Image (tube, rainbow, N blue to C red):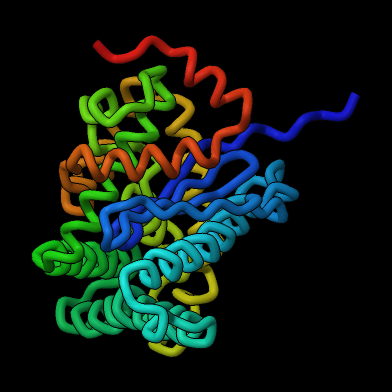
């Protein structure tokens, strides 16, 4: 008998005035357009990453790459729904945007903390594990400052509301509630599989991983940070994946608290209209069997 692949969790991402969802067989993005309606685009879900679903660490890297690709497609769709046809983004513009974003990410969150820690290490005489702790603390500090800063921008606050709507919609689906705005609103904006939780896990794993490199010269220092990114991402994925399956264990819930608390910076309480968009996107990616089960649920009182 052929072994069936393990079902994938429903996941999502907030975009401009909307939410992207990814199910077992489809991905969709739903956006509130300037006229007040909801535009929806649905596609078959890519399956190439699923080929590696039995390979720990590797499956995390391939899933991350797949998610990044879908995320930028969803962002492009959402951005183009907010502007006239003659101002819409081309594929070339999206490609350059992606390249610039990845370069800035590497510079701000990888290279800058490494260089700063190198200087502080010389000043304080840090080496070995404590040098990497200092680097990790700098990286987390920059990350927190970045989240606080962008959270004060009105348009980003709206995106954070849709991020909260995404979490509430998924929670309603996973916990057997009706997929209605009022029913979903009662759930928390926190979710263990959130990308924010993943990023914080990455930053903790980097401290442990980089400690094996000692304190090399600055060229090797920067190079090692970039080369081992896939390994760190894969290991972090496995940690989040395992935690999501064992949240009934007290020590697992405790270990996830910092990442869940951090989501208070990247989510906001959504409106019922925003939840309607998130639930529209969610329903669009459910299989026929899942929709039948959802529609059979008792309606909220």
Residue extending farthest to the right is 1
Percent from the top left, x then y, of residue 187? 25, 27
Q: Nearer the viewer, residue 256 or 159?
A: 159
Compared with residue 297, is residue 267 higher up or lower down, i.e. above or below? Answer: below
Percent from the top left, x then y, of residue 170? 39, 34
Q: Which residue corresponds to the image point at 38% horizontal and 10% vertical from the top-left?
A: 298
Residue extending farthest to the front is 35
Residue extending farthest to the left is 152
Q: Which residue corresponds to the image point at 18% horizontal and 65% vertical from the top-left?
A: 155
In this figure, what is the number of numbered marks? 0
Quadrant position of residue 253? top left
Quadrant position of residue 174? top left
The image quadrant where one finds the C terminus is: top left
Compared with residue 27, is residue 66 higher up or lower down, i.e. above or below? Answer: below
The image quadrant where one finds the N terminus is: top right
Residue 280 is at least partly visible in this image: yes
Percent from the top left, x then y, of residue 32? 31, 55
Residue 248 is at least partly visible in this image: no
Q: Nearer the viewer, residue 204 or 265?
A: 265
Locate residue 23 relative to residue 6 in the image: left or right.
Answer: left
Locate residue 128 relative to residue 189 in the image: left or right.
Answer: right
Percent from the top left, x then y, of residue 92? 52, 87
Q: Nearer the viewer, residue 44 or 239?
A: 44
Compared with residue 267, is residue 275 higher up or lower down, i.e. above or below? Answer: above
Q: Which residue corresponds to the image point at 21% horizontal and 49% vertical from the top-left?
A: 161
Q: Which residue corresponds to the image point at 56% horizontal and 51% vertical from the top-left?
A: 42
């Amino acid at each position: 008998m052929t072994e069936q692949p393990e079902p994938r969790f429903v996941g999502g991402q907030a975009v401009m005035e909307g939410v992207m969802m990814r199910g077992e067989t489809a991905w969709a993005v739903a956006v509130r357009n300037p006229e007040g309606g909801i535009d929806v685009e649905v596609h078959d879900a890519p399956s190439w990453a699923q080929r590696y679903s039995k390979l720990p660490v590797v499956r995390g890297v391939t899933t991350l790459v797949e998610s990044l690709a879908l995320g930028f497609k969803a962002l492009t769709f959402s951005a183009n729904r907010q502007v006239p046809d003659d101002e819409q983004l081309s594929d070339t513009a999206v490609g350059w945007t992606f390249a610039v974003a990845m370069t800035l990410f590497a510079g701000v969150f990888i290279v800058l903390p490494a260089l700063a820690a190198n200087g502080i290490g010389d000043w304080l005489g840090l080496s070995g594990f404590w040098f990497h702790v200092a680097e990790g603390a700098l990286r987390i500090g920059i990350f927190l400052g970045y989240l606080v800063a962008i959270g004060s921008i009105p348009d980003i606050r709206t995106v954070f509301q849709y991020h909260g709507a995404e979490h509430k919609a998924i929670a309603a689906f996973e916990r057997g509630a009706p997929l209605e705005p009022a029913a979903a609103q009662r759930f928390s904006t926190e979710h263990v599989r959130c990308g924010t939780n993943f990023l914080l896990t990455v930053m903790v794993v980097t401290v442990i991983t980089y400690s094996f490199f000692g304190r090399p010269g600055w060229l090797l220092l920067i190079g090692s940070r970039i080369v081992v990114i896939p390994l760190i991402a894969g290991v972090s994925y496995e940690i989040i994946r395992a935690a999501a399956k064992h949240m009934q264990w007290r020590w697992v819930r405790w270990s996830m608290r910092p990442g869940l608390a951090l989501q208070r910076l990247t989510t906001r309480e959504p409106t019922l209209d925003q939840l309607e968009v998130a639930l529209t996107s969610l329903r669009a990616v459910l299989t026929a069997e899942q929709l039948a089960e959802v529609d059979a649920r008792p309606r909220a009182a």
